[in-house]
Image (cartoon, rainbow, N blue to C red):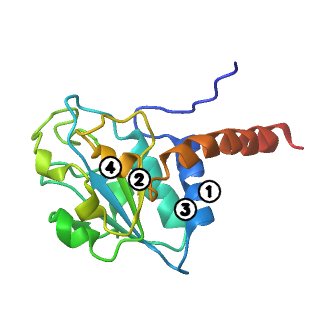
Amino acid sequence: IPVINLEGTLGHPLQALADAITITENMTVERPKVVLSWAPHPRALPHAVPHSFVRMAQQMDLDLVITHPKGYELDPRVTQHIPIEYDQNEALKGADFVYVKNWSSYSPYGKILTKDANWMMDQKKLGSAFFMHCLPVRRNVVVAGEVLDGKKSLVIEQANNRTYAAQLVLKKLLGS
């Protein structure tokens, strides 16, 4: 089985393309509010997915907000002009899509500054928004099982759209 990944330490463009497809297919309003929310994780994870997601979102007509505990800022060159909200509940108000992902501190890079379980996504916080995560995910650490398995979870659709994203990239590269 061929594997096409394209993930590096600071970027994951193939995942971002799959995420863009997923959002576009599920939009119910012209300019949806999308929240990128940090989540707790036992390991310090790279910035690849959140950086690429922010870059992708800047190319779309989305109302993007990033929420995370203080100290978990992403690369300011990537997040400039994007609202940052340190109160997760405030950031989630009125969200149409919530993309949950852990990342380590940027400066100093790779550190875990907190494992605050209050940042885990649950159904009460999610409300009526769609849930997104790039997988794999730690159930009941990053996200509550009820959200992951719920009707508003797009994780399987996102994973499926990775196939289409890879096909689009290959088609473009091969020029046909």
Q: Quadrant of the C terminus?
A: top right
Q: Disc 3 or disc 2, which is closer to the eye?
A: 2
What residue is disc 3 on? 23
Seen in the picture, residue 10 relative to 64 is either above or below; the reply is above
For the residues marked 1 and 2, what is the alpha-carbon distance in whole angstroms? 20 Å
For the residues marked 3 and 4, what is the alpha-carbon distance in whole angstroms? 21 Å
What residue is disc 4 on? 146
Q: Earlier in the sequence, mark 4 or mark 1?
A: 1
The image shows residue 93 at horizontal and vertical percentages of 27, 75
What residue is disc 2 on? 150
- In front of the other: 49 or 115: 115
Crowd around label 3: few <14 · some 14–19 · many ≥20 (10 Å) = many
- In front of the other: 174 or 121: 121
Q: Are marks 1 and 2 in contact (CB under 8 Å)?
A: no
Residue 21's disc number: 1
Which secondary structure lies at badge 1?
A: helix
- In front of the other: 146 or 174: 146
Seen in the picture, residue 37 relative to 2 is either above or below; the reply is below
- Look at label 2 and name its amino acid: Gly
Which secondary structure lies at badge 4?
A: helix
The image shows residue 62 at horizontal and vertical percentages of 48, 72
